[in-house]
Image: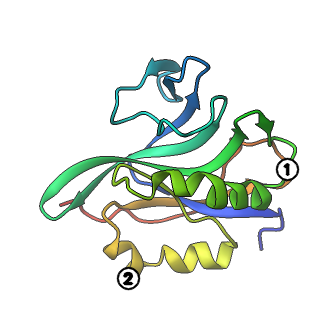
Amino acid sequence: MYKRQGQFTWRADKSVLITVIKTAARETTVYVHDLDQAFIANEKGSLPHNCPTGTVLLGQMVVDFADGCYAARIMFFDVVSYGADDLRAMLPAARHSILRSDVAPLFQNSTDMSVQWVGFRSAAEDFCDQSVRRSLPHDVECVFLMPDDAPPGCMVPVRFFKQSPGP
């Protein structure tokens, strides 16, 4: 049994891990971890105008297939800072609470960005079981842990899923 404490969520198959930053210039910078490069986001990839400057969000860019179409979407699973508030010392559960209460409302009218579910391991694995995975618009690669004893951005895969065929 896995003993490390923290919060769990899933990584989509073929997703791209990103850090999204609302810069002082009110622009949005997107850092793509796999490329080790940062880009200025276009309007579609930018955080909403009412998002506080200094906000840093961790997430994944996925390509969903729904209603016969492909669509790029960003799902956020962690918040490093919200405006001027540095949240790195907080536990993942507390950071996710802020993500749900303060950040999620910013995306209420968006189909391109959302806050991803985070919780207990059993719930994450139940959520990602085969019947639920089939209802998602993307495949699930793994369930991962955001440990209580590590900084934001540390993700430990704890269960991998067999890949299902794409559309």
Residue drawn at x 79%, y 38% as measured from the top left: 85
Q: Position of residue 163 (x, y in %)?
A: 36, 62
From mark 2 to mark 1, how far is it between C-alphas? 34 Å
Q: Position of residue 147 (x, y in %)?
A: 78, 54
Residue drawn at x 72%, y 63% as measured from the top left: 7
Q: Which residue is mark 1?
A: 90
Q: Position of residue 146 (x, y in %)?
A: 71, 54
Residue 157 seen in this snapshot: no
What is the number of the mark on residue 39?
none
Out of 46 and 12, give the one closest to the viewer. 46
Task: Say which amino acid is labelled 2.
Answer: Ser
Residue drawn at x 36%, y 61% as measured from the top left: 139
Determine contact: label 2, label 1, CB under 8 Å.
Answer: no
Out of 158 and 138, give the one closest to the viewer. 138
Element type at marker 1?
loop
Q: Which residue is mark 2?
A: 131
Residue drawn at x 55%, y 80% as measured from the top left: 126
Hey, which quadrant is residue 79 in on the image?
top right
Q: Position of residue 81 (x, y in %)?
A: 72, 38
Quarter holding the N terminus is bottom right
Disc 1 crowd, CA 10 A, few/some/many (<14, 14-19, 20+): some
Please, is residue 60 above or below residue 32 in the view? below
37 left or right, relative to 90: left
Please, is residue 114 above or below residue 26 in the view? below
Hey, which quadrant is residue 25 in on the image?
top right
Out of 90 and 126, give the one closest to the viewer. 90
126 left or right, relative to 99: left
